[in-house]
Image (cartoon, rainbow, N blue to C red):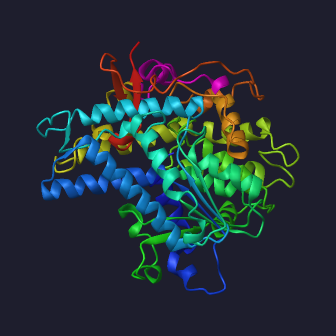
Amino acid sequence: MGIPCYFSHIIKTYSNIIRNLLHFKNNRLFRFHNLYLDSNSIIYDVVRELETKNTEKGISMSIDVFEKSVIDNVLLAIEGYCRVVSPTKVFYIAFDGDAPMAKKIQQKMRRYKSHFMSTLNLEPATTETTVNSKWNTNEISPGTAFMNNLSSRVHSYFANKEKELNVDKIIVSCSNMKGEGEHKIFEHVRQCATTDDNIAIYGLDADLFMLSMYHLDLCRNIYVFREAPEFIKSSIPLKQQNTGSNLYCIDIQILCSGVLSEMNCLFFDKHRLRDYLLLCHFLGNDFVPHTPVLNLRTSGMSLLVDSYRECIGSKEGKFLISKETKEIEWPNVMKVLERIAKMERDILIEEMDKRRRWKGRFTGKQDEMKDAPMLLRAKEEYINPKEDGWRTRYKKALGNVESVDNYKRVIDGVNKYYDTGELTVYSKSRYGPLLTEVVRSDHSCVTTTPSMVLTELDIMPKKEDKFEIEMSYMRYDWEGEVKIWD
């Protein structure tokens, strides 16, 4: 799911979960035992800051000098976080390595989109050996010369540095080691953390919140922290601002309590948190294709929670995830989706009318590129749920809509992924089936998985490839999905 959208949603809903990092630093009785860095985001931050600085000062660098400067600053940033948080037991530095197939497909789409957006830059072209504009962030990929160089530098920089940083153990897992950074982190949590450890995890990926909530039964004191980005600053309580630090922690235990309170089920049970996390997958994310009626930007989350409360939460001992096996109880899931499916057409009609009104009020002063999904709505108008046959037109207009069987297979696989770190299923589609089709299917889960292999070279954009950005039912241009033409 969209990171800014998800992050903003939880902050606005549960503002009491935010604490400035100094809140913990000023408590003499509190110590962070483990610090985990999901470090890829640090590279992007450093690149952005360095490019901004170079642009403002008119500095031109060779690519080699630019990349060396990026690595130098990444090392300093990583060390800086350790000195600020001051973990006593473990300092774990993780970068993304070779990812599961589902993630590789998503990365491929993201890189094609990044490549396309870069072609819209109207600034004069630069030479191949200097960096006057944007550096190609596709280099932040396992196996590239840049990442290999970074990995080597990180290992050597933090070798035998435990005494200097006053921590028992430093662990480095770079891009040459398999797995996404966040899943490497939680593999270590599952194996080594104790129930009462105070854990700080750096990053802004929505997966970090989901994974932290999944693992709260193993470690009760998990805090996700990061600098406050512009899009959530207005949501931070005033008493937490202006404290001298721009690092904010999200208390996962309080967040989970807030979620259970929001669910407001007749029969309270902490296990319902697992059900809530499963519901979140139906909103779509890097692995699960989006279905238009379940959109976090509109009413998707409330639709799911309200339906769950009525169909499952009102029944004692009834859940979406089995307490015993942790498997999905698909008949119960279908009860939740059936209630929403009955409203699906009306919801899409209401959303279509809202989007029509927005387009009618467009003055031209807004950012036309950013708002492109609200302006270029030909396919949505063609689908038009007000007229019969709209379900057929949905498939025809969007093309390659995910099959019901694979949609359920992916949901099941992703649910296991957050528990185990293993993901063997994937979706090549970015639009999910309509719920009216899902609820008409067999109420079991298909377990057969297709086979496919992608290398790092396969997910890099190629000049000869042709593709388009599909923006139907999106809000902003960056949410668009890539469709590569065969």
x, y percent for residue 199: 65, 66
**Quick check: 100 above or below 181?**
above
Q: Which residues are magenta?
A: 383-406
**Quick check: 361 above or below 480?**
below
x, y percent for residue 248: 49, 70
Given residues 258 and 66, the one toward you in this image is: 66
**Residue 309 occupies which quadrant of the picture?**
bottom right
At a point 15% along the width and 53% down the height, the residue shown is 59
Quadrant showing the C terminus? top left
**Quick check: 431 above or below 475?**
above
Kindly tell me whether residue 297 is visible in this rendering: no
Kindly tell me whether residue 200 is visible in this rendering: yes
Given residues 482 and 311, the one toward you in this image is: 482
Give the residue at the far top of this rendering. Answer: 486
Q: Left of 220 or right of it: where is 246? A: left
**Quick check: 226 above or below 340?**
below
x, y percent for residue 305: 64, 53
At a point 42% along the width and 21% down the height, the residue shown is 397
Q: Left of 319 or right of it: where is 428? A: left
Given residues 85 and 387, the one toward you in this image is: 85
At a point 75% along the width and 48% down the height, the residue shown is 311
Q: Left of 288 or right of it: where is 46? A: left
How many circles with numbers are drawn on the protein? 0
x, y percent for residue 106: 49, 33
Given residues 386 and 307, the one toward you in this image is: 307
Is 480 contained in the magenta span?
no
**Residue 414 occupies which quadrant of the picture?**
top right
At a point 50% along the width and 44% down the height, the residue shown is 295
